[in-house]
């Protein structure tokens, strides 16, 4: 067990981010409350050095351990390494925390087989050492299942509404699999798009739903893999 994880009581989660960290903040505020009892974020990892979410983590009470690993800096510092090697390195950082769950909260990098193979225990992460129990990974995506996979989902949904192609959009928390945004949904919430409203208003209402569903989805999966009674 790593030094940082040994200092975190109860259930541990690792959160991966790329940006401002508003969804991370929802998790920070919920940790060790009735919404996420006996739960602490043991690590926040970003692939962007300037991500404000890292500041949110260090300013939390108590401060949350952070790490940074960017794809291009990694490749530049390791000639001959590939994107798959980067994904394995991200997984190596994650599994050393021995988390019960990994949450992608605005992580703007598509995870390849390297990451999933390590967290699923199918690939060694340190010499021949493998994890013994697969670590579930969930992702927050601002669209309904099967709709607007990938980037710019909010903008694409808003445009589709303007064209009369859809009547509403939504948000989901889903399990991470090899296919982008195609994992089994954990929780799904519809979000209405109002006629005539600017995209900024729709986006703000959608974010309000995100901040709730990311906590609820995290709690649901944690309760499946690490019930409070088993760690208290």
Image: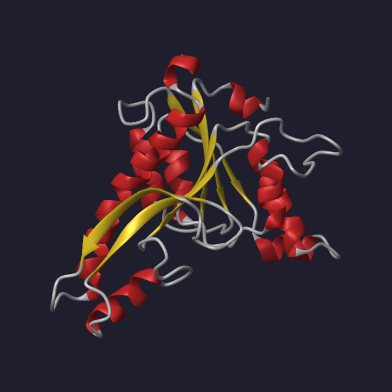
Give the residue at x 20% y 69%.
193
Q: Is residue 49 above or below residue 42?
A: below
57 left or right of 90 in image: left
Q: Position of residue 154 (x, y in %)?
A: 34, 70
Q: Position of residue 208 (x, y in %)?
A: 25, 53
Give the residue at x 31% y 48%.
211
**Foreground: 120 or 200?**
120
Q: Position of residue 65 (x, y in %)?
A: 55, 36
Q: Is residue 214 above or below residue 10?
A: below
Q: Position of residue 99 (x, y in %)?
A: 58, 33
The image quadrant where one finds the N terminus is: top right
66 left or right of 31 in image: right
Q: Is residue 13 above or below residue 143?
A: above
Which image quadrant is residue 122 in? top right
Q: Is residue 165 above or below residue 226?
A: below
Give the residue at x 77% y 41%.
125
């Amino acid at each position: 067990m790593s030094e940082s994880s040994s200092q975190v009581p109860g259930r541990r989660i690792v959160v991966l981010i790329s940006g401002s960290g508003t969804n991370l903040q929802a998790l920070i505020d919920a940790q060790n409350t009735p919404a996420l009892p006996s739960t602490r974020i043991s690590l926040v990892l970003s692939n962007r050095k300037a991500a404000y979410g890292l500041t949110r983590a260090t300013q939390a009470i108590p401060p949350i351990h952070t790490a940074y690993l960017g794809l291009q800096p990694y490749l530049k510092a390791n000639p001959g390494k590939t994107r798959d090697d980067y994904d394995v390195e991200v997984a190596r950082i994650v599994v050393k925390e021995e988390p019960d769950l990994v949450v992608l909260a605005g992580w703007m990098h598509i995870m390849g087989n390297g990451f999933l193979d390590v967290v699923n225990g199918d690939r060694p992460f340190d010499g021949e050492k493998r994890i013994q129990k697969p670590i579930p990974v969930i992702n927050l995506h601002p669209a309904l299942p099967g709709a607007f996979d990938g980037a710019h989902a909010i903008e694409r949904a808003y445009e589709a509404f303007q064209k009369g192609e859809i009547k509403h959009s939504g948000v989901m928390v889903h399990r991470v699999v090899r296919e982008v945004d195609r994992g089994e949904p954990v929780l799904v919430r519809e979000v209405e798009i109002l006629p005539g409203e600017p995209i900024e208003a729709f986006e703000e209402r959608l974010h309000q739903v995100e901040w709730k569903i990311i906590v609820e989805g995290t709690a649901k999966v944690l309760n499946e893999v690490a019930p409070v009674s088993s760690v208290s």
